[in-house]
Image (spheres, rainbow, N blue to C red):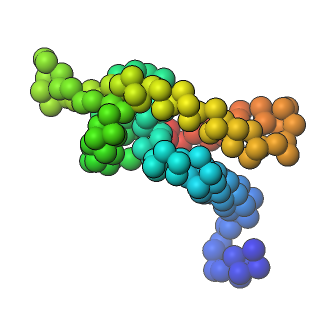
Amino acid sequence: MNRLTKLPIDSLNVDAVTVVTNIYRVAQGLRIKMEREVLAEYNLSWTSFSILYDLWIGQSIETKRLAELAGVTKATVSNITKTLENKDFCYRKKDLRDRRITYVTITEKGKHVMEELYPHFHKGEVEIVSSLSNDEQRTISKLLRKVVKDQKF
């Protein structure tokens, strides 16, 4: 932080810098750990897993909504769903009333992969927060939800 405090910034909020930096580090660490230890075996990237997870929970989702959930562009969703479709994990279907709208639906093979993969993924989630008590985990969850809600991510 020494370098930051020397910058000509009138109102440097060191606490804000610390919180955001730590959120970023945790998010990056989580992503790297899961891609290496769980998702690589299934040849899935973090984003492709996120989309497949959302489909597993939601069954059939419009591409615009998938993009919002994954925090990526519709073009990225299109590319990833094309790859997932080639693996027979999902399929795309145009809305019959509005051909501009495309829905993505998980296949039985995609469901099977998620049912096999998710317990390993969850084990990684538990390991990542294992140094925190259940109360601390709930507190962090509550505070992060507040940040997300306030920023409308």
Task: Please report the residue visible at 74 percent of the width from the left and 46 percent of the height from the top.
Answer: 128
* Percent x, y of residue 6: 71, 82
Count of number-bearing discs: 0
**Quadrant of the image containing the N terminus:** bottom right
Give residue 98's position: percent from left, percent from top. 13, 23
Q: Looking at this rendering, what residue extends furthest in the top direction?
A: 97
Left-right relation of 64 to 48: left
**Picture residue at 70% right of the left edge, 57% below the top:** 22
Who's the residue at 64% across and 32% down the image? Answer: 119
- State whether residue 143 appears in this view: no
Of residues 34 and 67, the one nearer the viewer is 34
Q: Residue at x 56, y 31 (%)?
A: 116
Residue 87 located left or right of residue 5: left
Where is residue 72 shown, x and y percent of the image?
38, 47
Q: Position of residue 74 (x, y in %)?
A: 29, 43
Q: Is residue 76 visible?
A: yes
Examine the image and state in which quarter residue 138 appears. Answer: top right
Report the front residue among 1 and 131: 131
Q: Eyeballing the image, is 97 above or below 139?
A: above
